[in-house]
Amino acid sequence: MNSIITNLLFSSLFFYSFASINFRGVEEFSWIPNLLGLILCVSFILNNPKIKFNYSLVILGIFIFWNLLSAFINPDLFRFFITSFLIFVLSFIVYNICLKYPESSEYIKWAFILSLFFYYRK
């Protein structure tokens, strides 16, 4: 059972990386990387994580808080807060996955390489 969850974690990491690179900036397809990021979060939680924290995430959290303050000043910026928070959570999860499983960086690398071929064909 644990190997199935680990394979789900690696495949969701690959698909999230692939979709977030390919659908970057395409507004009508922005739900695809968000959904795959949610699947990545669920598979990370199912894998019983031991979370490691670093100080660069604190700085990123400060930027998110600053973005939240600007969202209350201008409601149109609230979408940027949600996007920044999603990036923060998913970068934290990807960082912890790469710490626990060093081979997971290969999945990110291959997603990036395949995305170059698809992006070049557009």
Image (tube, rainbow, N blue to C red):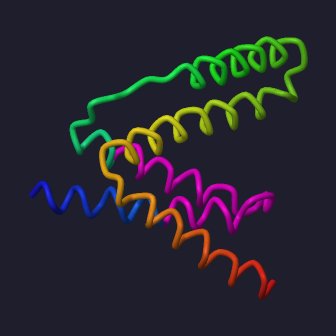
Quadrant where the N terminus is found in the figure: bottom left
Q: Is residue 32 magenta?
A: yes
122 vs 98, left or right, is right
Quadrant where the C terminus is found in the figure: bottom right
> Magenta: predominant secondary structure element?
helix
Q: Tell how many labels.
A: 0
Residue plotted at (24% across, 43% down): 46
Q: Is residue 8 above or below residue 63?
A: below
5 vs 10, left or right, is left
42 vs 74, left or right, is left
Q: Which sits in the foreground, 1 or 57?
A: 57
Report which quarter residue 44 is drawn in: top left
Residue 13 in the image: x percent, y percent? 44, 58
Report which quarter residue 49 is drawn in: top left
Q: Which residues are magenta?
A: 15-42
Residue plotted at (34% across, 28% down): 51
Residue 27 in the image: x percent, y percent? 79, 57
Q: Is residue 37 magenta?
A: yes
Q: Residue furthest left?
A: 1
Residue plotted at (69% across, 56% down): 30
Residue 9 in the image: x percent, y percent? 33, 56
Q: Which sits in the foreground, 65 or 99?
A: 99
Residue 84 in the image: x percent, y percent? 69, 33
36 vs 34, left or right, is left
Residue plotted at (75% across, 78% down): 119
Q: Residue furthest front?
A: 102
Report which quarter residue 107 is drawn in: bottom left
